[in-house]
Amino acid sequence: MSLKIKAISGVKWTTISTVVVAILQLLQLSILTRFLNPSDFGSMALVMVVIGFSQAFLDMGISNAIIYKQEISHEQLSTLYWVNVLSGFIVFVITVLISPLVSIFYGEPELKKLIIIVGITFIIQPFGQQFMILWQKEMRFRGIAKIDIITKTVSLFFSTFLAYKGFGVYALVYGRILAVTCQTALYVFNGLNEHRPSFIFKINNIGEFLSFGLYQMGEKTINYFNSQFDTILIGKLIGLEALGIYNIAKQLILKPIDIIGPIITKVTFPTMAKIQNEKTRLKNIYLKTLNYLSSVILPIYILLIILAPEIILLLFGKKWLEAIPILQILSVYGILRSIGSPVGSLLLAKGKANWGFWWNFFFLFYVPIGIYISSYWGMIGISWGLVIMAISGTIPNWFFLVRPLCGAKFIEYHLSYLLPLTISSIVFILLFLLKYFLEFSPIVNTIYISILSFIMFTFLNRWLNNQFYEDLFSLYRK
């Protein structure tokens, strides 16, 4: 199978899985907000900050090193497998040790228990991690899609059942543990038929993987801290209930990135890695990826801004109405963040994990200061602070990363997303004016505006962004 056909198949199956998974997660969130309080979601948000921070250390960045390195021996894979398992146990022990400190910092005794219970996933997950990465490297996205869908479906029903039975925040905790366990079991069961790690542990043979991985681990750690500093600060200064409301809005704006992001990282990274030395071809793929990503994801954020009141009311109910302005502001942040996201695949494809580390290291000083200053204006201030910082990073992102990696010129780079941005701005103005004349129920407004936006985006893309329009329908037919 050619690289192009594999990429098309990868896009198809990754799209199916991410859309279905996103719908399942959104359905789960909508159901659980009926049973749980904002403070429950605030507690879980803080737990996931600790877990997510620790997750960066789980495989020591080895997963992406396996994809980047085109030739790997069985001996190296076996050693890397046991390094993953060992690091999982070490991360779990560290998580247990720091849980009392987190609990004391926020003045919430229950956090210690929650963090330790969710931390059990660090022991489970490494046993299936390498099998998933090998499938991704071989671009076997059909199998990955099936496992993702099965896992999230099981988690949905289990978490909903526990919430109905009054388990509170533990419905979220136990749902996550079951999801990780189910995913690991499926990868191990299927993976052992193709690759059975031997009991080999020769650390000297994996030096280049560890070098690549350490930068990756450092980048992920710093990047995650930067992306979660708002959660850390709100939980400390404003309280768990406010954090729960803010986090609901934040989860919603991250959904489009969660849907489209995996298509970018899972498909374009191995595709770019295979042509890493063909600079012109690499540039064309990157710019086309940026244009297509913007063309798909910007309309979603435009709808989130326009329909924020209807979405919050329909999905979560009246007790979450405070999240409406936060959702609208963070949608602008989501647009800017999605524009910069493809550079991650470009960095890894060129083996420049160290560049990503230093880039995020700079923002480690910039982001916390910006968020701390904007926190004086509460959750709204923090939301606008994120938008301002995202805008300020757009040109440096091109100059320091994209330009030297693939040779994209200033005009080439910015035109790739400015055309979809222009189309989205036109649709936004028309829908904003139109909404003043609509006096229907929230569900009718949502359906009516969604249909109109689809028609507008289709017409404008066919007229102004024809290459995207033609390729999208060509992909659909294939």
Image (spheres, rainbow, N blue to C red):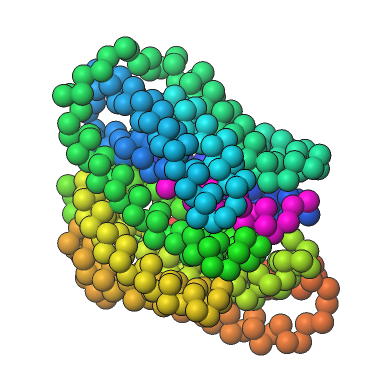
Query: In this picture, is 259 found above or below 5?
Result: below
Above or below residue 316? Residue 372 is below
| Image position, residue 474 (x, y; %) | 49, 53
Towards the viewer: 184 or 402: 184
Residue displayed at 52% across by 51% down: 104
Residue 438 picture location, percent across and down: 78, 82
Q: What stretch is highlighted in magenta?
A: 35-53
As displayed, is residue 276 above or below residue 465? above
Number of numbered markers? 0
Question: Quarter holding the N terminus?
Answer: top left
Q: In this view, does 393 lie to the left or right of 338?
A: left
Q: Which of 156 and 136 is in front in this view?
A: 156
Q: In this view, does 4 lie to the left or right of 317?
A: left
31 or 245: nearer the eye? 245
- At horizontal 56% and vertical 73% (from top left) the residue drawn is 379
Tell me what residue is drawn at x 53 percent, y 80 percent.
Answer: 377
The reply to whether residue 177 is visible in this rendering is yes
Q: Give yes or no for residue 23 being in the magenta stretch.
A: no
Q: Determine whether, in the image, residue 339 is placed left or right of residue 22.
A: left
Q: Position of residue 195 (x, y in %)?
A: 38, 17
